[in-house]
Image (tube, rainbow, N blue to C red):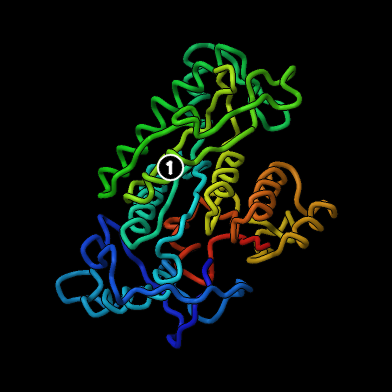
Amino acid sequence: MATVTSNASPKSFSFTVSNPFKTLIPNKSPSLCYPTRNKNHHRLGFSIKATVSTPPSIATGNAPSPDYRVEILSESLPFIQKFRGKTIVVKYGGAAMTSPELKSSVVSDLVLLACVGLRPILVHGGGPDINRYLKQLNIPAEFRDGLRVTDATTMEIVSMVLVGKVNKNLVSLINAAGATAVGLSGHDGRLLTARPVPNSAQLGFVGEVARVDPSVLRPLVDYGYIPVIASVAADDSGQAYNINADTVAGELAAALGAEKLILLTDVAGILENKEDPSSLIKEIDIKGVKKMIEDGKVAGGMIPKVKCCIRSLAQGVKTASIIDGRRQHSLLHEIMSDEGAGTMITG
């Protein structure tokens, strides 16, 4: 979710992105200035929703009229001004990785954001693909406390699937959609240095981030590439480790001084009542979300995600959001509207 000011009334619209805005907005336009940040991050009255209302149509079919398209573009301008030139780190996972429609939605959103001047970085895991290949090789998948038990054989498969298959597939999809992506892992350019988790005796080659060196990323984003990063890395001796993708995204966002960290998940966001999907909390600060953990309102698999967000905010990231990746164009909802697509946590 974004905070901008406009006199326009809220509107709803529907659209499909294909190589968007590439020629509409040049890289350095004197008409696109950076507005002063609203440090309170409160949502105001302006809202763009990529939802289900029917726009005016032309006589030849159901496509929106040219005037309607222009109106939507003009109303997007405050959001583009706010985030143009800013780094956005997105962790991609969950249902959005397994559904072709959602995968296409995420890719087109990333391309649109890059074309209008944002600097997106995509971090991914690939649990479903890893499980499928393990099953084909008759290797059982084992988890403890939500983490994959990773012996030497499993680690080899994790590296092959994440770096060789999932990463390159995402790069190809982004390139085909009109942007230019570069596939990396934590190994490349010593981007990430890993260390074993404290309970490595039980988990095997499961790691955490010891150091981040974003030097290899800076020239890529400066020249308009979209880095796509697989969540594996090596320690100082060269031993490879499987690292949680949420953790990788949070540490990269902190090291880059990102404007936003966005975690795509299979839930609506943080709920006031875990049993009530309608109790979504749209915005909360660190103090409030820590209290929810203490009270048991945030539990299970949501705890590491929330702690990842808290850690990134403490290291200088402006906002961190946990959003519903099951929703079409959830990234655009979160960045280009006041409504958002989940829960935004502020410092």
Q: Is residue 278 above or below residue 307?
A: below
Q: Is residue 176 left or right of residue 138?
A: left
Nearer the observer, 133 or 175: 175
Quarter the C terminus occupies: bottom right
Q: Quadrant of residue 113?
A: bottom left
Q: Position of residue 75 (x, y in %)?
A: 37, 77
Nearer the observer, 139 or 212: 212
Q: Is residue 4 above or below residue 305?
A: below
Q: Name the residue: 64% across, 50% down.
A: 312
Q: Residue furthest left?
A: 60
Q: Name the residue: 40% across, 65% down.
A: 84
Q: Position of residue 121 (x, y in %)?
A: 44, 47
Residue identified by numbered label 1: 217
Where disc 1 sits, the SS reads helix
Q: Residue furthest bottom?
A: 7
Q: Quadrant of residue 200?
A: top right
Q: Name the residue: 63% across, 66% down.
A: 282
Q: Amino acid at mark 1?
A: Leu
Q: Is residue 158 left or right of residue 170?
A: right
Q: Is residue 172 left or right of residue 52?
A: left
Q: Is residue 143 above or below residue 110?
A: above
Please count the marks in the image.
1
Disc 1 packing (10 Å; few <14; some 14–19; many ≥20):
many
Q: Position of residue 141 (x, y in %)?
A: 60, 20
Q: Name the residue: 27% across, 60% down.
A: 20
Q: Position of residue 74 (x, y in %)?
A: 32, 77
